[in-house]
Image (cartoon, rainbow, N blue to C red):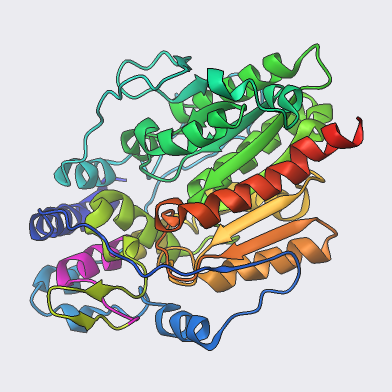
Amino acid sequence: MSSFSGAIQRPLVAAAAVAVASFSGEISDKFPRSKGDCSTSNLAHSPSCNTFSESKSSWVSQISVSNLSDLSFVSQIRAPVPDVNFRVPSYSHNSVTNSNYSSVASSPLMKNLYNSAGLTRVVPRPSTYSNDISNSTSEVMYKWHLPQPNSLGDLNCPSAKSRTVVVLLGWLGARQKHLKKYAEWYTSKGYHVITFTFPMSEVLSYQPGGKAEENVHLLVDHLADWLEGENEKNLVFHTFSNTGWLTYGVILEHLQKQDPSVMERIRGCIVDSAPVSYPDPEVWASGFSAAFLKKNSVATKGSGFSDESTGSDEASGSKPAATEAALLLILKKFFEVVLYLPAVNRRLSDVLSLLSSKQPRCPQLYIYSTADRVIPADSVESFVETQRRAGHDVRACNFVSSPHVDHFRNDPQLYTSQLSQFLDKCVTNSCKSSH
């Protein structure tokens, strides 16, 4: 591990520091709004959508060392396979010790990259109608949000809603405050909500059997306890980006081992800005870059946006600045090694296989965008068609122009209408049919 860290740690830290310095000021994002393309059958697109897709499909892959001549250290980067004994145990309900494990993600190079970007955790203020159920003293892992009092008079099957918990699984780098608006919308409709997030430091220090895995298991155990003893209680999952979607896969795996009958209590799954159902270094590089740089990353701005200061429209294939391009290139090289370590690849394959072929027989809603520069739209559409061919009830909505995990803010009316229609089908229809 030390030889691996020494080879690329210094350029990684330098790239992160220069990138953050270059984007020190946050610029408010302005995006063109579109009605979107939502369907339950075919995924048809307008010519403008196809233009977006063609122009940005592999924007990270277009970055080359030769384009970064001003950053001479990039050409010296090497990514040898680290000589470490990397073992990942199977996930089970039994406790696992950490003594004999090493983790590439917990190496100093990734921790220093995160620290150099100056992205530290903060303590969020408690949200209304929520109870903290984590022992963390800084950033809580998950919160329980109670239905808002004024929602109890809702005549649209209030009992079915009050017996349903919506589990929100955050994206890479998301904090509790980022999921607050989603939780508030659900609680305003009469649902219980649990918001679950991984702080960046938790992701970077991940070890099999460690705290991150323990937090997922604690969440699953808590859900199982809530469901126990009352057959009419149900779950709906709402995942964000590939991180939330993969977390959902680990939760399903744990539920299947702990109590397979619980799978029948899952009434629906909403997948926002995902998935890419295979280990793709470009996607992982884009995701980590966006998490490090946040709104300063071009990945969070979509494939096309207007520059009102100059009165001109940026090209749909706009490129990142040289410093961010360097960071993306380094991360891509890093994940080209890490994702294909045998143990890591095997573990990812297990979770991805479950999500591809062993999902619950409940309706699925996929919310995505042609302009998403982290998760390619064609990857989402391909997965949607695979699920439909497998006999799943699937709905998909393309927001066309909104950036990664920013569809709610970009078009709240379309977003909430999609959620309402989906929940009406998953949760309240059974209530109405019984009356």
Q: Quadrant of the C terminus?
A: top right
Q: Is residue 190 magenta?
A: no
Quadrant assignment, res 193: top right
Q: Which of 35 and 364 is in front in this view?
A: 35
Q: Nearer the viewer, residue 123 or 128?
A: 128
For residue 52, above or below residue 38: below
In the image, taking residue 165 as reference, residue 388 lies left or right, namely right
Q: Which residue is drawn at 42% across and 20% down?
A: 128
Where does the image place residue 322, in percent across and percent down from the top left?
Answer: 16, 72
Q: Nearer the viewer, residue 12 or 50?
A: 50
Quadrant assignment, res 199: top left
Q: Is residue 321 magenta?
A: yes
Where does the image place residue 69, in percent across and percent down from the top left?
Answer: 11, 80
In the image, taking residue 240 as reference, residue 257 lies left or right, namely right
Q: Is residue 146 visible to us here?
A: no
In the image, taking residue 251 as reference, residue 113 lies left or right, namely left
Q: Residue at x 32, y 50 (%)?
A: 291
Prevailing SS of the magenta stretch: helix
Outermost residue toward the right?
Answer: 434
For residue 136, above or below residue 165: above
Q: Residue at x 56, y 40 (%)?
A: 247
Quadrant assignment, res 267: top right
For residue 286, above or below residue 143: below
Give the magenta range.
Answer: 316-331
Q: Is residue 155 visible to us here?
A: yes
